Amino acid sequence: MRLILMGPPGAGKGTQARVVAEHFGVPAISTGDIFRANVSQGTALGVEAKRYMDAGEYVPDDVTNRMVRDRIDEPDAAPGFLLDGYPRTLDQVEELDGMIAHTGHSLDAAVVLTVDPEELVQRLLQRAQTDGRTDDTEDVIRRRQEVYAEQTEPLIGVYRERGILVELDGMGEVSAVTQRIFDALDVIPQS
Ligand code: ADP
């Protein structure tokens, strides 16, 4: 199973990614988590990424693409993977196509979680109090929503045209959203 999970910041991608990946027996690969791990380890990648993350901007495509390519090449991702937070730009879509074509497979589904804009901000402000992420301040949250609308929303049309888009309601209980994802994906043929 080769899946991508999309949705604006606060849509619940990370939460759902872990459960859904386990259900399909594939690794959940979160670009945000990999960047944060690099930041806390103080690697060169982390130092570069942090500047962008703290401003609510996307890390440059060449950096992100290289990182995902390396991760997907690891043995545990050979049977498939769930990407959380990648691709987010049209350039990343093209890169991912190349990475997957190289393995002789194709993307099975692009899941998009839809949540009301005000609910998104509330969820992230809530998370700011519990998780202390440095990019969960109100200004940066709003900037991340704008960047998503400008750079990532257009990807929805790309995957819709390919016939692999699965648009789901991300509102309500976490377990209810998980069930919606399972119901939609369990009937999809895997490549
Ligand atoms: P959220 O979806 O809540 O914004 P993430 O944890 O997925 O959070 O990402 C945090 C930050 O990491 C983003 O704001 C961005 O700076 C960077 N990032 C994550 N994924 C990508 C990507 N695919 N391309 C560029 N930057 C990314």
Image (spheres, rainbow, N blue to C red):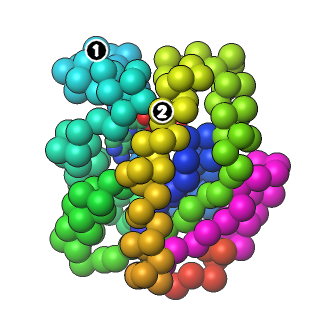
Kind of residue at badge 1: Gly
Left or right side of 94 for 150:
right
Mark 2 and 1 residues: CB-CB less than 8 Å, in contact?
no
**Is the CB–ligand 1 distance for label 1 below 8 Å?**
no
Q: Provide residue 119's location: percent of width, then percent of height.
A: 73, 41
Q: Secondary structure at mark 2?
A: helix
Of mark 2 and mark 1, the one earlier in the sequence is: 1
In the rendered image, the vertical position of residue 161 relative to residue 38, given as above or below: below
Disc 2 to disc 1, how far (Cα)?
A: 25 Å
State the mark number for residue 153: none
Q: Count neighbours of disc 2 (C-alpha within 10 A) and say few if under 14, some if 14 to 19, many if 20 or more.
A: some
Left or right side of 28 for 88:
left
Q: Nearer the viewer, mark 2 or mark 1?
A: 2
What residue is at 63 percent from the left and 20 percent from the top?
A: 128
Q: Quadrant of residue 161?
A: bottom left
Magenta includes 181? yes
Q: Provide residue 63's location: percent of width, then percent of height.
A: 20, 39
Q: Quadrant of ligand 1?
A: top left
Name the residue beneath numbered marker 1: 42
The magenta segment:
164-183
Q: Secondary structure at mark 1?
A: loop
Residue 48 showing in the rendered view: yes
State the mark number for residue 143: 2
Q: Residue 145 or 59: which is nearer the viewer?
A: 145
In the rendered image, the vertical position of residue 115 relative to residue 58, given as above or below: below
What residue is at 24 percent from the left and 78 percent from the top?
A: 104
What residue is at 23 percent from the left and 23 percent from the top?
A: 48
Q: Provide residue 109's location: percent of width, then percent of height.
A: 49, 72
